[in-house]
Image (tube, rainbow, N blue to C red):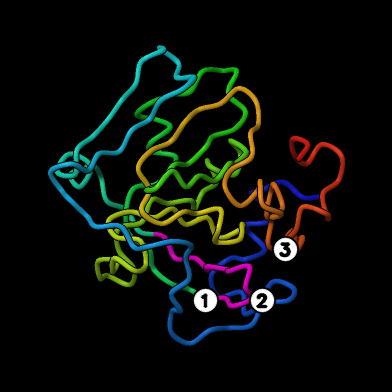
């Protein structure tokens, strides 16, 4: 199995290739589990906690997070339901920037990304720190709609889209892996699109904690 960055390079913008089992989608279908949360800017915050390098937590309110350096990346989005959006432009805050602002402890190997209603997705640190991983606030220059994750969603082009939650509220640094919401319910613990890692029964030893 290739390293996460290699997988991301296979899905590079303009490659003209789709991962196995995927079809190119015109438009952007809405897919999610549960209700769409109501955004309350006065109550919204983004937190980084867990095994940070200094042992401290960090949080930003919506105005503070919106003021962080805004970057854009062009990348694909691949849904496990088999549709793929090609060469979308995502604007927001890179995951690497979060790691720089709040360094993890050297013992950190994984992160858990937390979203509204307690939804979670676990990631290897190497996946989270991939070059085009971004906490997106915009797509193609327009603010995300609430159905597509406003005010914040994580986009990781080399992993299936369930690994990039909508309505993100925080990141937990972890020194050991722990399955997230869908990973506990039969989805693959890693979810690399080019390896077509869709289901937990496809896992090899070492791919994740026992179910």
* Stretch in magenta: 73-84
Q: How many marks?
A: 3
The spot of residue 203 in percent (x, y) is: 82, 49
Q: In the image, what residue occupies the spot 43% across and 79% down?
A: 28
The spot of residue 59 in percent (x, y) is: 27, 30
Q: In the image, what residue occupies the spot 39% across and 68% down?
A: 89
161 and 142: which is toward the camera: 161
The image quadrant of residue 122 is top right
**Quadrant of the drawing holding the C terminus:** top right
Q: In the image, what residue occupies the spot 53% across and 70% down?
A: 13
Residue 18 has which mark?
A: 2
Disc 1 is placed on an element classified as: strand
Relative to 200, residue 101 above or below: above
Q: Closer to the N terminus: mark 3 or mark 2?
A: 2
Q: Closer to the N terminus: mark 1 or mark 3?
A: 1
Residue on which disc 1 sits: 86
Residue on which disc 3 sits: 194
User: Tag 2: Cα neighbours inside 10 Å, few (<14), some, or many (≥20)?
Assistant: some
Q: CA distance from mark 2 to mark 1?
A: 9 Å
| Circles 3, 2 touching at the beta carbon (< 8 Å) | no
The spot of residue 27 in percent (x, y) is: 43, 84
The residue lying furthest to the top in this view is 54
Task: Report the side of 35 relative to 202 (left or right).
Answer: left
Q: Closer to the N terminus: mark 2 or mark 1?
A: 2
Task: Report the side of 160 relative to 116 (left or right).
Answer: right
Disc 2 is placed on an element classified as: loop
């Amino acid at each position: 199995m290739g390293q996460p960055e290699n997988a991301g390079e296979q899905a590079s913008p303009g490659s003209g290739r789709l991962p196995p089992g995927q079809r190119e989608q015109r438009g952007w279908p809405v897919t999610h589990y549960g209700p769409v949360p109501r955004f309350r800017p006065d109550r919204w915050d983004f937190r980084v906690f867990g095994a940070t390098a200094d042992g401290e937590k960090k949080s930003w309110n919506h105005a503070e997070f919106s003021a962080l350096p805004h970057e854009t990346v062009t990348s694909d989005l691949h849904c496990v339901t088999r549709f793929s959006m090609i060469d979308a432009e995502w604007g927001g805050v890179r995951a690497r920037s979060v790691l720089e602002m709040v360094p993890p402890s050297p013992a950190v190997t994984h992160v858990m990304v937390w979203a509204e209603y307690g939804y979670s997705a676990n990631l290897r640190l190497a996946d989270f720190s991939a070059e085009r991983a971004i906490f997106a606030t915009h797509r193609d220059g327009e603010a995300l709609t609430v159905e597509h994750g406003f005010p914040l969603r994580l986009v990781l082009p080399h992993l299936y889209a369930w690994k990039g939650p909508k309505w993100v509220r925080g990141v937990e640094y972890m020194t050991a892996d722990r399955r997230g919401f869908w990973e506990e319910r039969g989805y693959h613990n890693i979810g690399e699109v080019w390896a077509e890692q869709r289901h937990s029964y496809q896992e090899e030893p070492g791919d994740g904690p026992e179910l």
